[in-house]
Image (cartoon, rainbow, N blue to C red):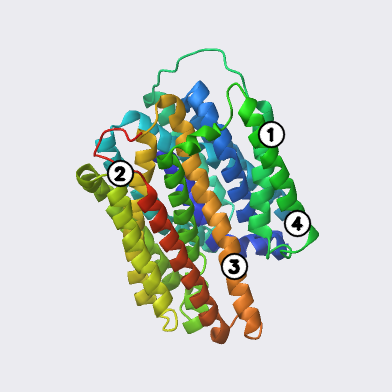
Amino acid sequence: MLTTGLIAIDATILATAVPSVVGDLGEFDQFPWLFSVYLLAQAVSVPIYSKLADTVGRKPIVLIGVGLFLVGSILCAFAWNMTALIVFRVIQGLGAGAAAPMSMTIIGDLYTVAERAKVQGYIASVWAISSVVGPALGGVFSQFASWRWIFLVNIPLCLVAGWALIRFYRESVERRRHHIDYAGAALLTVGLTAVMLGLLEGGNAWAWASPQSIGCFAVGAAALVGFVLVERRAAEPILDLRIFRRRLIASTTLVSLGVGALLTGVTSFVPSYLETAIGVVPLLSGLAVAALTLGWPLSASLSGRLYLRIGFRSTAVIGSVIATAGAVALAVSAPYPSPWIVAAIAFVMGFGLGWVAAPTLIAAQASVDWNERGVVTGTNAFARSAGSALGVAVFGSIANNVIAANGGEADAATIVPASAAVFIATAVTAVLMLAASAWMPRDRVAEPVR
């Protein structure tokens, strides 16, 4: 929970301080990279950390993650310009790529399937609390102190988390000689970096049809094709692609893609929708979105009782139905903007997603042994990050096209139809996630699902 808290607070604390950062360092046009490079570094490093964790153990990897996050935070606090801050955010992202998935993997190691849902509820509560504490701290530091404290506050948190891991977490790892798949790791990093960069910056930093965008996807596709060829011959592949032949792993990975995209559809577009359409203040629009993070831990903590009775697949399907109903309601109510309606819908969606995310992750973890659990957990985490990046790209493109077709000004007259189009796309995504949940193999309670 301490380690997860580091990543959870950082995910929300910076956004409210952007005006202060730009006011101090300048280069307003560069500030979106503060978020893009962090997400990129976090996402592309997850598969490599996950394989290493299945090789050398979880403890050294999670400690490396906390250490990198600490170093990155210190460097960010003393950044002298926007370029330096962006570079140091990469180091933070590399730390987050190890710390967050390893926390979930360790839970899979320590707790039984029956116990895991309750523990997942505790972890979900960390994200819920952080969604409120993060923006509040960011606002307080920006207004009454300095934005640099946003990063300095991580120092004691990292030290406490690191000490607790060293002091209390013990694991037994079978020591043997390993063949490190350097070529696979390099090709995977290049491929994922290029594709994620194209998704995150296409339509933002450059046009979709620009040489930069085409180059990103071309390089990414070539590297990933090379990665697949290398993995077929590697003695110990960095990502054993054969795991995706298992219906459970393939289906839960698709579900995680959907979860990431749905989160993006709500958290990225609802605030601008409410603030521009009816002039809601940022605090109120933020609270409307935060309702999603209240429903999530509530259902996640209760999901264990449900999946122990009816199974992982049935629980995920019920959660997907609830989340889909919320997404459809959001699309239907879009022409009538109201923070209270949005908050109620966000709570329903969060409640549904809690019954999707936790059971599908636990089912995937329960289906493998220790030596594959890190890769399976990391794949789940990466899929959610990739879904978020894809959601930003697709939903952003939809919104921009609708705004351009209605005059090109992001005002009350154009933001409502643009948001409605995005929310319809979100509802379609929810339906696809429901289909992926239904594709999961049938299972019985508590026993491993193969």
Q: Amino acid at mark 3?
A: Gly
Q: Amino acid at mark 2?
A: Arg
Q: Residue at x 36, y 62 (%)?
A: 323
Q: Position of residue 10 (x, y in %)?
A: 51, 50
In front: mark 4 or mark 2?
Answer: 2
Q: Quick one: label 1 or label 2, which is nearer the N terminus?
A: 1
Q: Identify the residue position indicated by label 3 in the image.
A: 396
Q: Residue at x 41, y 52 (%)?
A: 436
In the depicted structure, whether residue 283 falls above or below residue 70 = below
Q: Position of residue 427 (x, y in %)?
A: 43, 67
Check disc 2 and report its element: helix, strand or loop.
loop
Q: CA distance from mark 4 to mark 2?
A: 41 Å
In front: mark 4 or mark 1?
Answer: 4
Which quadrant is home to the N terminus? Answer: top left
Q: Identify the residue position indicated by label 4 in the image.
A: 214
Q: Residue at x 50, y 52 (%)?
A: 11
Check disc 1 and report its element: helix, strand or loop.
helix
Q: Residue at x 66, y 64 (%)?
A: 23
Which residue is situated farthest in the top direction here?
A: 176
Q: Identify the residue position indicated by label 1 in the image.
A: 186
In the depicted structure, whether residue 82 falls above or below residue 62 = below
Q: CA distance from mark 3 to mark 2?
A: 36 Å
Q: Quick one: label 4 or label 1, which is nearer the N terminus?
A: 1
In front: mark 3 or mark 4?
Answer: 4
Q: CA distance from mark 3 to mark 1?
A: 30 Å
| Residue 90 placement, left or right of 345 | right
Q: CA distance from mark 3 to mark 4?
A: 18 Å
In front: mark 3 or mark 2?
Answer: 2
In the depicted structure, whether residue 397 falls above or below residue 193 = below
Q: Identify the residue position indicated by label 2 in the image.
A: 442
Q: Amino acid at mark 1?
A: Ala
Q: Residues within 10 Å of mark 1 (few under 14, many from 20)?
A: some
